[in-house]
Amino acid sequence: MNQPALPAEVDRERLRALLPRLAGRRVLVVGDLCLDEYLIGHAERMSREAPVPVLEFSERFTRAGAAANPALNVSSLGGVAMVAGLVGDDDSGHQLRRKLSEQGVAVDGVITDTTRSTTVKTRILAEVGSRFLQQVVRMDYAPRAGISGDARGELLRYVDEASRHVDAVLVSDYKGGVVGTELIRMCAGLVHDRGQLVTVDTQGDLFAFRGLTLAKCNCPDAETVLRRPLPDNEAIARASAQLRRRLGAKAMLITRGRDGMTLAEAGACFHIPATNRSDVFDVTGAGDTVIAVVTLAVAAGAQYLDAAVLANYAAGIVVRRFGNATSTHDELAEAIGVS
């Protein structure tokens, strides 16, 4: 298998030696939870009512999504994953809690807010040929009510206590309202007061997360927050360094799809090429995999660059699969190869 060129500072044997150290590392994932629902059907004909295909139903299944996905990635690599977030007192919330438990994720921090419903994202997909699934539409069932004061207080108390017993805290912000000012302030305090490793992956206001250890966003979100295009490596390098300084973070990671990712540390910037640019089936959840593996690896003592490269390999694995997916120790070892 052809191996992509890596930064000169990265050694494949060192990466492989890192893998066993991931086991047993404790990571608390805090953020917006949702249940992903998939409805799959075979395209029979075009509708006479509208220019849309008529699908004959063939399958329905659900998966844990949003902030649940980084927790599942931590667990699949041998880490001890705990998740903190909110669900409603409904069947979707019960399903979500059960799915996480079945896959080894601790759910003591999944708080039930009786004033609102569980977020559900329903994707309707058409079967095209023997392998390909084409998403036709996505419908989100988002809670209409805000988070109750009791539920938010219970969540904050759980995070404060549970964070004392983990190697890292990962904040997964899907703009669902869980990651608010109080939680961000608490997480910044964990870094400042305890020296704790706290990472964030956000689709929201990046500058709200000042004072954390490492921040991650994708390139379009970086362009939005900086209000300028980032068309090439040079522009990305400047942007990642600028964001790291403004956030007061030790590291800033910008994911770039088929162009890999860029990591900025104090005095250094690295462009990491994608390990898989051709065999891409579904990019859903790839960013969750990246932040989970980076967090787990740094918690295991890895340098930021090694952690980012390892996460890049993991992302190259999961995009070959449908929906939210995870990688394993053996798959990463095979992908890394040998020097």
Image: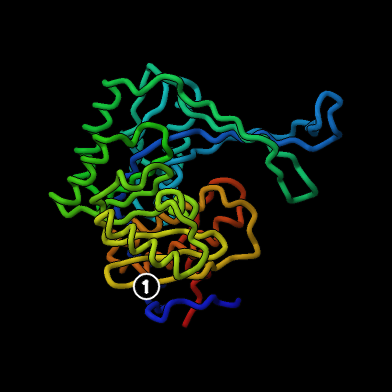
User: Seen from this angle, which residue lies furthest left?
Assistant: 193
- At 47% from the left and 76% from the top, the residue drawn is 6
- At 37% from the left and 76% from the top, the residue drawn is 14
Q: Is residue 109 left or right of residue 236?
A: left
How would you rate the neighbour count of disc 1 (Cα within 10 Å): few for under 14, some for 14-19, many for 20 or more? few
Q: Nearer the viewer, residue 79 or 269?
A: 269
Q: Amino acid at mark 1?
A: Ala
Q: Is residue 264 left or right of residue 162?
A: right
User: Seen from this angle, which residue lies furthest front?
Assistant: 228
- Residue 126 at least partly seen: yes
Dot 1 lies on which element? helix
Counting the numbered discs, the total is 1
Check disc 1 and report the residue beneath it.
17
Instruction: Indicate the position of residue 327 as horizontal and vertical percent values.
Output: 50, 57
Q: Image quadrant of residue 136?
A: top right
Q: Is residue 58 left or right of residue 173?
A: right
- 73 relative to 311, above or below: above
- At 57% from the left and 52% from the top, the residue drawn is 283
Q: Nearer the viewer, residue 86 or 53?
A: 53
- Residue 288 at least partly seen: no
- The quarter of the image holding the N terminus is bottom right
Instruction: Indicate the position of residue 205 as horizontal and vertical percent values.
Output: 37, 43
Q: Image quadrant of residue 257?
A: bottom right
Q: Nearer the viewer, residue 153 or 94?
A: 153
